[in-house]
Image: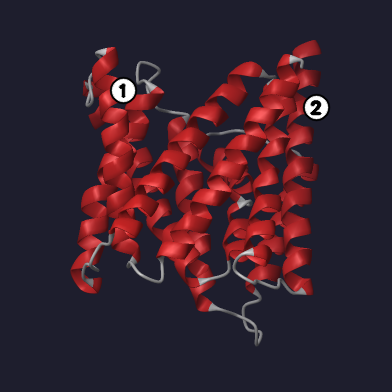
Amino acid sequence: MTPNNRGALFMVLAMAGFAVEDALIKGMGGALPPGQIIAMLGAFGGLALLIVLRLRGVALFPPETLSGPVILRNLSEAFGTVCFVTALVKVDLATASAILQATPLVVTLGAVLFLGETVGWRRWAAMSVGFLGVLVILRPGMAGFDPAALWAVGGMLGLAFRDLATRRVPASMDSLQLSFQAFALLVPVGLALSVTSGLAPLTPTLLGTVALCATIGLFAYWTIVSAMRLGDVSYVTPFRYSRMVFALFIGIGIFGERPDLLTWLGIALIIGSGLYTFFRERRVAAQSATA
């Protein structure tokens, strides 16, 4: 296999891992409140990364931790995780996953508004179509509107701001340091949420499910990093949308979800606009490089 094909394979594996992790979280939602799930995932993931960082002799909290971009990134990721986990518990897996696919569009919009980047009318049009897709799925003001789906919108916005803040994180910060801090912050955040919902009793099955969920999440994180290193970004990135395919199969096959016509239409609009925006950015970058 060529490096690009290996990168694409790793990206698909990563997206499959994230979809399975989402399904496990949704499955635990019937027995554990979202806050408890979040705190436990943070504890398991944080502990694993702590061991890796210690073995490498890397500081857990370097001085850059107190810089504005790092603080914003950690808070945005915590907010996005809380919202998305809550969405997984409360709405269909396909719905939550579809709305999350609009994150790159929000990142592009945020780059224009906050980072001074410029986009042409074609990408503005594509972003508008993608956001229209989100509205089609949400269908506010219609009989099918579910207010709980707004949790997925909150997750999308939080993770988009995380990605924007990451662009301004000091280069001296290791990616594993950022990941450890994000996981560690989930523990107090999840426990704080549990003050109102309480803590549910844990069984060996639930503990094993949380451990499996955290392990799959870390595996997916490793494979997505490997994918970006193996292949060209322009070749590998579109395979991120395979997460939606896995989410649909799991949602329909395991949870008995039946997306309606408007949901399918919204998914098509979001993915189509995202792919167009990505390939348009690639073309503009290539033209700038040869100018």
Quarter that holds the N terminus: top right
Residue 188, compared with residue 263, is above or below; it is above
Q: Which residue is mark 2?
A: 283
**Mark 2 vs mark 1: which is more N-terminal?**
1
Residue 192: image x %, image y %? Answer: 21, 60
Q: Is residue 71 visible?
A: no
> Horizontal placement of 231 versus 165: left or right?
right
> Horizontal placement of 281 versus 27: left or right?
right
Q: Which-is-in-front pick, marks 2 and 1? A: 1
Question: What's the distance in space between the residues labelled 2 and 1, CA to CA?
Answer: 39 Å
Q: Residues within 10 Å of mark 2 (few under 14, many from 20)?
A: few
Any mark on residue 24, and which?
Answer: none
Q: Quadrant of residue 234?
A: top right
Q: Residue at x 33, y 54 (%)?
A: 38
Q: Is residue 107 visible?
A: yes
Secondary structure state at the residue bearing disc 1: helix
Q: Which residue is mark 1?
A: 52
Q: Amino acid at mark 2?
A: Arg
Residue 185: image x %, image y %? Answer: 26, 44
Q: Residue at x 33, y 48 (%)?
A: 41
Residue 5: image x %, image y %? Answer: 75, 23
Q: Amino acid at mark 1?
A: Val
Nearer to the camera, 281 or 113: 281
Q: Quadrant of residue 25?
A: bottom left
Figure colour scheme: secondary structure
> Horizontal placement of 156 versus 109: left or right?
left
Nearer to the camera, 224 or 72: 224
Q: Residues within 10 Å of mark 1 (few under 14, many from 20)?
A: some
Secondary structure state at the residue bearing disc 2: helix
Nearer to the camera, 250 or 85: 250
Q: Residue at x 69, y 58 (%)?
A: 249
